[in-house]
Image (tube, rainbow, N blue to C red):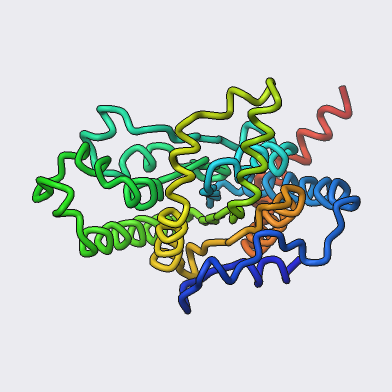
Amino acid sequence: MQQIVKKFKITGDKKISLKDFDTNDAEGYKKEDAAGILEDLIAETAELQNKLYAANQQSLLIIFQAMDAAGKDSAIKHTMSGINPQGCQVYSFKQPSAEDYDHDFLWRHYKALPERGRIGIHNRSHYENVLVTRVHPSFIMKENLPGITSEKDIDDKFWQQRFKSIRHFEKHLSDNGTVIIKFFLHLSKKEQKERFLKRIEDSSKNWKFSAADIEERQRWDDYQEAYEEAINATSTPESPWYVIPADRKWFARISISTIIVETLKDLKLQYPVLKPGDADKLTEVKRMLEDE
């Protein structure tokens, strides 16, 4: 299990190239064993979540980013299926609203952060502001930022400042008890094509497909470059990225669950222990109930 964590974890100590990561990797796991392994991981996650919820001191923020059809939705569905809904919340971020554009780019994401004791899942996240906006800088113009009067003003200094804002944001969260896991589901262009075709051929999945998906696919190399730079610029020991091979959905789910479990285990979570006086009262209440 630790091998998965070690192999896919990016902490920023050195630059990475996405081309060096095999999107079809399975680390020796077999598909026929995947269901049983995932079931065990989900059970372990559920127990750790109970401790996180009971302790009510820290929270866990899980971020999913990926190209279209990489399997974000299904990964969330399968890896979090055994989690107590009271301790988990999922946000799927769409295009910003007019109100969002009237605030800084982190505002709507800050509002969606998990409370202490909870697990928060962000399906897409504040990273859209250095990914889709990097490929389509026209979106930046909607933010009405001071000093940005045309797309020519959106230079490398602008993006470096935005990366800096993200690092500071995540450091602040970490310092105040929010543990952050960032998953990039690394899909091959060939596998994306196959999944798009399946969406078109299966009428029950037609709703998932949009002509805009094909338009974005034409910018594949631009997106890969944007992801690579964002990962290199914002990977830190307290807020690491994990580059998850996503061509095999079953292995991606095992990897994600493994990393969640190992992250929670590292927190050394314990159920709260009653104070001596409270423990005595509990013993007294127990005796009263038994004597009824």
Q: Is residue 104 left or right of residue 46?
A: left
Q: Can you say which quadrant of the picture contains the C terminus?
A: top right
Give the image quarter of residue 79.
top right
Give the image quarter of residue 121.
top right
126, 69: nearer the viewer: 69
Q: Is residue 129 left or right of residue 113?
A: left
The x, y position of residue 241, in whole percent, is 52, 62
The residue drawn where x is 31% and y is 28% is 97
The x, y position of residue 278, in whole percent, is 66, 44
51, 204: nearer the viewer: 204
The x, y position of residue 62, in whole percent, is 55, 49
Q: Can you say which quadrant of the picture contains the N terminus?
A: bottom right
Q: Is residue 165 left or right of residue 146?
A: right
Vertical relation: 269 (above or below) 68: below
Residue lying at the far right in this picture: please name it.
32
The residue drawn where x is 63% and y is 58% is 244
The x, y position of residue 289, in whole percent, is 83, 27
The residue drawn where x is 87% and y is 57% is 30
Visible residue check, residue 276: no
Vertical relation: 203 (above or below) 241: above
277, 82: nearer the viewer: 82
Visible residue check, residue 249: yes
